[in-house]
Amino acid sequence: MALLKWDPFKDLLTIQERMNRLFDETLSRTKGAGEDMGRSGWHPPVDIYETEEHIVLKAELPGIDKKDIEVEINDNILVLKGERRFEKNVQEENYHRMERSYGIFQRAFTLPYIVDKDNVKAKYNHGVLEIILEKKREQRPKHIKVEAR
């Protein structure tokens, strides 16, 4: 039997993530206290990563029509806005459980580099929005080769 070294900080990070999630859920519910739980504001999950030439943002937006999605870039801040509309063909009182969130969302992300606003591409496929932002040439990291003598 192998001995495993206990890392107390790993447990603390897990607890911190759970507490953050709990506070986020509680605050989002109190903001829309007058609204139904399923109709309060929500935040789609995103992944943001970079390559040498681009910054890429992927957002999960299932069930949203692309006409209900807005993307803006202003002063190195990317804003993602939209709305998931409640399905009108089913009456709300006929639901047994409503776990999906509906309503307006808005998220803003400060970009780590200045991007070329004229070369932004957005693709929406199978409920995933992919935004590809090209870094400005002068902002890209320059690799310098070190020579030995």
Image (spheres, rainbow, N blue to C red):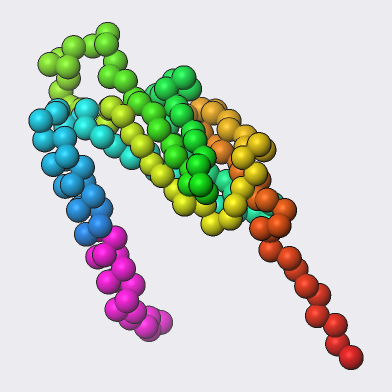
Q: Which residues are magenta?
A: 1-18
Q: Residue furthest left?
A: 34
Residue found 23% across the figure and 11% down from its top: 90
Q: Is residue 123 left or right of residue 46?
A: right
Percent across and percent down for residue 144 are 78, 73
Confirm whether the magenta stretch covers residue 2: yes
Q: Residue furthest bottom?
A: 149
Residue found 33% across the figure and 81% down from its top: 6
Quadrant containing the N terminus is bottom left
Residue found 23% across the figure and 50% down from its top: 24
Q: Is residue 58 visible?
A: no
Percent across and percent down for residue 132 are 61, 41
What kind of secondary structure does the magenta stretch mostly adopt?
Answer: helix
Q: Which of these two is toward me, 95 or 149?
A: 149
Residue found 11% across the figure and 35% down from its top: 33
Task: Determine whether 82 is above or below 149 in the image.
Answer: above
Confirm whether the magenta stretch covers residue 16: yes
